[in-house]
Image (cartoon, coloured by chain):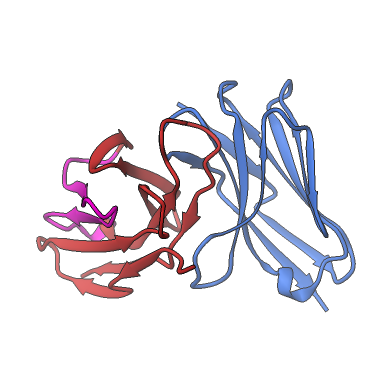
Amino acid sequence: GENVEQHPSTLSVQEGDSAVIKCTYSDSASNYFPWYKQELGKRPQLIIDIRSNVGEKKDQRIAVTLNKTAKHFSLHITETQPEDSAVYFCAAGGTSYGKLTFGQGTILTVHP
Amino acid sequence: KAGVTQTPRYLIKTRGQQVTLSCSPISGHRSVSWYQQTPGQGLQFLFEYFSETQRNKGNFPGRFSGRQFSNSRSEMNVSTLELGDSALYLCASSLGGDRISGNTIYFGEGSWLTVV
């Protein structure tokens, strides 16, 4: 089955800096790659997603890149703010109904 | 448009008991998936339902079961609870349909289950 590795497990940055989180996946058939943000005690919230026919997608301060050949995708957050502090999960899917395989998560802390 | 609604939000059960969790998907969404979230194992897929049929199942024992009703609402049941079943159980909904891929999945707030 699919396996998703996510790095780093923790990331600490100063406000205004950029943050990058990287994920690799094992199943070359995966074609859908969402990113979720989860604040303490809250639900995972979709922040951006990318499909395999696209190499890069951007939404304001957030961007995601996908390298299908290398089977890895990354989340880029620019001009980080304290409210960006949360756990971020990458996921891979698209090969079976309703199923996403998640990475282990990255705890992002943005210091004011 | 209302989001994914889960009830109850918090519950405490004793080992050996059973529990039923409920989920109402986003209006118009016909696919409901369930996930278990624990600190050790992360987010793991339990099963997916569409049009009252289970289309997909994760690697969980038969104590974990679910069903979907004609209005797309779903329930999941865990029988003979074990301490290790303590987790956040998340319901997710999507449009579903024939497409396997690319349907955006939205999560509910989850049901926190503690087994003592």
Q: Nearer the viewer, residue A104 or A50?
A: A50
**Quadrant placement of the C terminus of chain B:** bottom left
Q: Is residue B61 left or right of residue A42?
A: left
The residue located at (29%, 67%) in the rendering is B113
Q: Is residue B108 visible?
A: yes
Which chain can be seen in blue? Answer: A
Q: Is residue A108 left or right of residue A101?
A: right
User: Residue B80: x and y, percent?
Assistant: 11, 55
Image: B99 above or below B12? above
Q: Which chain is red?
A: B
Q: How many marks?
A: 0
Nearer to the camera, A65 or B87:
A65
Q: Residue at x 80, y 38 (%)?
A: A56
Give the residue at x 71% y 28%.
A53
- Asked if residue B25 lies left or right of residue B82, the reply is right
Residue B41 in sight from this viewpoint: no
Q: Nearer the viewer, residue A6 or A49?
A: A49
Q: Is residue A32 above or below residue A87?
A: above
Q: Residue at x 59, y 35 (%)?
A: A32
The percent coordinates of residue B26 (x first, y second) are 42, 59
B24 shown above or below A23: below
| Magenta stretch, residue numbers | B60-84
Q: Position of residue A82 (x, y in %)?
A: 76, 75
Which quadrant holds residue B87?
bottom left
Magenta stretch: residue B6 in it?
no
**Left or right of A16 in this view: B13:** left
Which residue occupies the foreground of this view, A90 or B13?
Answer: A90
